Amino acid sequence: MDALIGQLEDVEPDNILKSAEEFKNDKSDVKVNLSIGVCCDENGQLHIFKSVLEAEKLVQQRYKEKPYLLSNGTKEFSLLTQKLIFGENSKYVMEKKICTVQAIGGTGAIFIALQLFKRLHIHEICVTNRPYINHVNMITSYGFKVKYISFFEDKLVNINYDAFLYDLRNLEDGSVVMLQVSCYNPCSTNMEEIYFDQIADIVCKKKHVIVFDVAYQGFGSPNLNDDVSLIRKFEERGISFVVCQSFSKNMSLYGERAGALHIICKSKEERKIMANNLRIIIRKFYSSPTIHTNRIVCQLLENEKLKSEWINDLRELSERVHKNRVLFFEKMEFYQKKYDLNYDWSVYKKQSGIFSFVPLFAGIYDKLKEHHIYIIDNGRINVSGITARNVDYVAEKACLCLAVE
Ligand code: PLP
């Protein structure tokens, strides 16, 4: 083994992991971590949902033994998680067209989907420019080619819909495209409803396969359903697609690895074949998903009282994060005067999710580190990590760094 290990070449962690490590090693008292992809409370600690804690308590009282689950999870988990994405009155749910498996977080769902695409001899997967970096890591490391399509335009600080729709229209028929419906990571945008019909028209005509990565449901709008309205539009139009669902952020279950993969099939018969294929993929990789996670998610979603508490908490949390964002950019407006800067920060106040995406900050990423402020090198900051205690410090130093750039 020594000889084998000796052959290993060192590899760089991705920018998110790298920044997390640098933050950990920084001994300063004033250090601020805005690179991390978790939702913080007003003290900068991991947010906790009381409803999720209560669900876990009930699980611990009710169950003692921890048997293996089947590779796909449980019927109950599938149905409860489907309803969050597709709604209570979903035709796809009622017609049993959705093949669902419990996954090891959203990342696990993406992994299973990619393995399925391997079986289906797909060679290339499209991501939007300004992609979620782990999509690219996963796509390339599993041997697919990655293709970038137009999406976010830095100058607009928004999606360039003309360019996006043009590229979607001009992709080869049947292309596989990864998209996020709301709180796009890192772009921090929601796709606008006025474009949904055009997107659905192109996808129908070109028979593209859309993989929706839903990692921030509940953070983009006050109503959970609104965050997945493009998916509901696809259902209305009878389109078949894939959803990778994560509960890491919206249930604060990061380490429990809570997620699901949903694939729309034409019929119950096709769904059975799909389920057998997914089970084989899972069996060969990690055999079966985690039972404790399954039970917490089921307990939370089947208990009407806990579910509505969770939805209310989630709404309050996302409102608080939004207020943080507004406060931070108001402070930027204030401190920039001190440094004779004249940027328009109002555009960023409209962003959504736990991040803000400020391409300008990419240029001061290294300088911010000298002030013990950690962000992602593309300019993404975690606004949930902004607190009353650090907001002035971060805004003042960001303006200082921009002034000396
Ligand atoms: N997809 C997107 C867009 C994300 O931002 C994240 C997490 O940051 C994930 C997937 C991964 O989710 P999980 O932690 O559940 O694996």
Image: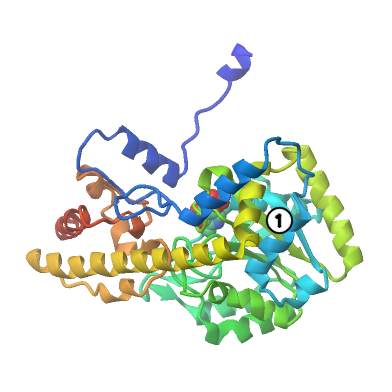
Instruction: Residue 25: give x, y in percent of width and height.
Output: 31, 32
Is 175 located above or below residue 116 in the figure? below
Please name the residue shown 76% across and 52% down the image. 74
Is 327 located above or below residue 137 in the figure? below
Residue 362 left/right relative to 193: left
Residue 81 left/right relative to 274: left
Label 1 secondary element: helix
Circle 1: residue type: Phe
Using the rendered view, name the quadrant where residue 378 is placed. Answer: bottom left
Whether ligand 1 has any atom under 8 Å from the Cβ at mark 1 is answered as no
Residue 236 left/right relative to 360: right
The residue carrying pointer 1 sits among few (fewer than 14), some (14 to 19) or many (20 or more) residues within 10 Å by Cα, namely many
Instruction: Residue 2: give x, y in percent of width and height.
Output: 59, 12
Please name the residue shown 71% across and 82% down the image. 236
Using the rendered view, name the quadrant where residue 320 is placed. Answer: bottom left
Residue 290 visible in this rendered orientation of the protein: no
Looking at the picture, tell me which residue is in the foreground, 360 or 252: 252
Residue 221 left/right relative to 96: left
Instruction: Residue 3: give x, y in percent of width and height.
Output: 61, 13
Residue 162 visible in this rendered orientation of the protein: yes
Residue sitting at the far front: 61
Looking at the picture, tell me which residue is in the foreground, 254 or 241: 254
Q: Which residue is mark 1?
A: 77
* The N terminus lies in quadrant: top right
Instruction: Residue 38: give x, y in percent of width and height.
Output: 43, 51
Looking at the picture, tell me which residue is in the foreground, 98 or 303: 303
* The C terminus lies in quadrant: bottom left
Please name the residue shown 64% across and 74% down the image. 231
